[in-house]
Amino acid sequence: MKKLFLLILRQLFFWILFFNFTRLVFLVYYSGIISVEGIRFTEVLGVFSHAFKLDLATACYFMIFPFLLLLLQSIWSPAWLNTLNKVYSCIMISVYSLSAAAEMGIYAEWKTKLTYKVIKYLSHPSEIYNSAETGTFFLLLLLFALMIAAGSFAYLRWFYRDFTWEKLPFWHSVIFALVIPPLLFTGLRGGVQQIPINQSQSYFSAHNILNLAAVNNAFNLYISIFENLGNMKENPFSFMDDKQAAVIMQGIYDVKKDTTVSVLTTTRPNIVILIMESWSADLIYELGGEPGITPRFSQLVKQGILFNSIYASGSRSEQGMACIFGGFPAHPISSITVQPDKFVKLPSLVSEMKKLNYSTAFYFGGQLIYGNIKSYIIFNGFDQIMEGENFPASIPRGKLGIHDEFSLGYMVNDLDRFRQPFLASLFTVSTHSPWDQPYQKPLKWGGNEQEYINAAYYTDHCLGEFFAKARQKPWFANTLFIIVADHSHNSYRNWHPESKEYHKIPLLMYGDVIKPEFRGKVWNKLGSQHDIASTLLAQMELQHESFRYSKNLFNPYSGEFAYYSTEDGAGWLHGGSYYTFEAHPYIGYKWSYFAPGTDSTQTIKEARAYLQSVFGNYLKD
């Protein structure tokens, strides 16, 4: 039995070393770029330590087939099973070497890892040869061959050992079958934590070349293909000619005058964005919710600007991040944040602030690995990123991370040391199951969502404590606070998941920088989460055209419309019209809701054109 375990461990160890060998080749190949960017050698070394967990997960995937072979060999072991194991491993070495060589070839031009889009490009070898410099092409071929040769030689010489069969007690095979699968499963998901591992685990540097080098090629390619499965050739939400859709989209976003109502006393305020986990509009009395759930928020409303017709673009946290910071709407099937080759092409609200010499920070009491958020946040270029493990160990934690009172309390003091102006954002955690906040639960109603509304009551209390402390800070007078949900959540009213009521969320601007005449106002403009970027930039008298799906909510001439996505379709509100639909290549499309007494024809065209445009740009970017 010991022999079986050793054979598994030797092969697993080989894959970890081989992944790092190809990574080293990549870093040496691009040492010139690394030198030009002035990256320290110690930071380059960090690539290997930050790559380990994702490499281990990938190696566990690779070891599933060898494990099955060894399990079979423990019972019945003809010589050809050893040969099959060696052939499998050499094939995998060759495939991985090809991915490494291809990645070296594309990085200089595309600044990305190998993805499904690149695979399609590589399916035309003649185009690759014609577009590449001859010397570079043959150098990559040589490196490809050397990686195969070195990997295969090392594997067969020092790591692989033939299994020589000897009659073993049957219980040895049983123990092997019971022990190894849980270990492999734990390894391939990155541990026993709630959220499985993803590319975020390897992101650590402000230099993207190091992050890409640290991400395992095979793991990234698998995610890219999986997220785009069935959508590699064409947009599944294509309802009309792209030119017709573009004309409709232009009409939707066209404004008679590029202007704005100026609601701030300064064009260079500090900015604090508080992203409230899963906050539904039904939590807010002023948005039609029951009283008593969020009374501190209601106090803020009296001195702020409440937007009463805002809808979450998506239903997951990673989608909300791309909406808020990138102005890119959520869409069905996948999320742009899980694919680094796509989100690096989005504009960034953070980078716009950094151009103005803003200092920046992002705080989250949990794990940013969820939905690959960490990768996306690092790409945005925050000067400081604090997630659960970065906070002092003495701070109390729950199952999902640091409770809101402690993360908000930490940030309000930490901002004292930041150079002004600053942009800081905090993502709360306590209004997410398992609702283990360390606070009273006074709300005895709510049915199936009683725990949820009590969690919101707790976070609202934390919000009140945060602002009580913030008002004592010297930076408070020049700070604009933006409070918005990442997405909505089922409420005590149990709306249909596709309905507009389900997707409605709070958006509040608050602070002394709001002109007195606008404090306590309710803003009725119909909009979505991704409108925040253009709205804020317009208040700062900055250009915002790069955020093509984001409109200025304070422009009297901008359209009265809102979009949100569902798993298989989208919702669309325009003026008094309201339309939601599902659209899928296998089930076709169907309408679910529509406002009676309105003309459906134009609304349906707009809804389909919008989703077609968003998903088309996701595929293209």
Image: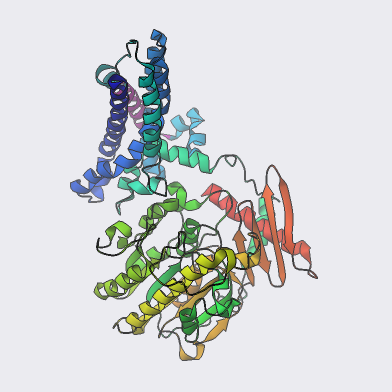
Which quadrant is the N terminus positioned in? top left
- Front residue (pair 491, 179): 179
Vertical arrangement, residue 86 with respect to residue 59, above or below: above
Q: Which residues are magenta?
A: 132-151
**Camera-side residue of 197 and 211:** 197
Residue 91 x %, y %: 41, 22
Residue 596, image x, y percentages = 79, 69
Residue extending farthest to the bottom is 517
Please tell me which residue is depicted at 32% across the width and 11% down the height of the picture.
164
Task: Give the prevailing secondary structure in the magenta stretch.
Answer: helix
Where is residue 417? Give x, y as percent. 24, 73
Taking the image as shown, residue 464 lies to the left or right of residue 588, namely: left
Task: Report how many numbered discs are placed on residues in the image.
Answer: 0
Rendering quarter of residue 162: top left
Is residue 399 depicted above or below 225 in this figure? below
Q: Is residue 73 magenta?
A: no
Q: Residue at x 30, y 46 (%)?
A: 210
The residue furthest top is 79
Please state which of residues 294 and 353 is positioned toward the viewer in this rendering.
294
Q: Is residue 11 above or below residue 616?
A: above
Look at the image and tell me whether residue 552 can be seen.
Answer: no
Q: Report whether 444 appears left or right of 579.
A: left
Residue 144 counted in the magenta span: yes
Report the coloring of the rendering.
rainbow
Q: Against 390, is 307 above or below?
A: below
The reply to whether residue 253 is in sight is yes
Residue 369: give x, y in percent of width and height: 39, 52
The residue positioned farthest toward the right in the image shown: 597
Q: Quadrant of residue 280?
A: bottom right
Q: Nearer the viewer, residue 529 or 503?
A: 503
Classify residue 134 as left or right of residue 596.
Answer: left
